[in-house]
Image (cartoon, rainbow, N blue to C red):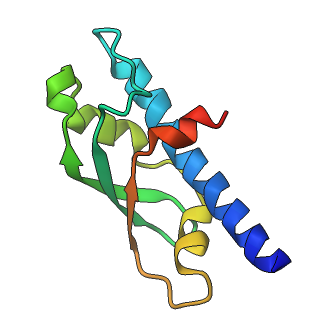
């Protein structure tokens, strides 16, 4: 059981790292003072992550950023190249590691500060 608890903690910390990265970049792009930690933002990312954990490319699978006058393209550009090494190990543990990871922008994680 302690191993499972550690694994969940690691996963949560990794998701927090990604969500804070998105939050920080959304905050910089936010021209209209929208609350970018609001549950009204819907974002689902598909990331292509290299073996060293660098985000090589991103596709946004679902988004309502246009409603808030935030450019998806600029957001993607601001995240590409960032290293978050835990992403591959958390999502695929001991299995053969694929490149593609899907992550939902979760504002509830931001509230757990």
Tell whether 36 sits left or right of 54. left
Which residue appears at 81% of the width and 80% of the height?
1
Residue 4 appears at what percent x and percent y?
Answer: 74, 77
Tell whether 98 sits left or right of 75. right
Residue 31 appears at what percent x and percent y?
Answer: 29, 11
Q: Nearer the viewer, residue 108 or 64?
A: 108
Which residue appears at 53% of the width and 73% of the height?
91
* Residue that lies at the very extreme toward the top in this rendered image: 32
Residue 9 appears at what percent x and percent y?
Answer: 72, 61
Determine which quarter of the picture holds residue 42. top left
Vertically, is 98 above or below 27? below
* Count of marks, rendered view: 0
Vertically, is 90 above or below 92? above
Q: Quadrant location of the C terminus? A: top right
Q: Nearer the viewer, residue 40 or 69?
A: 40
Which residue appears at 47% of the width and 68% of the height?
50
* Residue that lies at the very extreme toward the left in this rendered image: 66
Residue 66 appears at what percent x and percent y?
Answer: 15, 29
Which residue appears at 59% of the width and 46% of the height?
17
Determine which quarter of the picture holds residue 38. top left
């Amino acid at each position: 059981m302690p191993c499972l608890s550690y694994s969940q903690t690691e996963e949560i910390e990794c998701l927090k790292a990604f969500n804070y990265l998105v939050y920080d970049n959304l905050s910089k792009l936010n021209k209209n003072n929208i609350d970018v930690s609001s549950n009204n933002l819907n974002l689902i990312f598909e990331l292509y992550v290299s073996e060293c954990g660098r985000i090589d490319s991103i596709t946004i699978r679902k988004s309502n950023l246009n409603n808030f006058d935030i450019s998806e393209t600029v957001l993607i550009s601001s995240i590409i190249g960032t290293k978050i090494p835990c992403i591959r190990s958390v999502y695929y543990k001991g299995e053969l590691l694929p490149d593609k990871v899907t992550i939902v922008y979760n504002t509830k994680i931001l509230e757990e500060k």
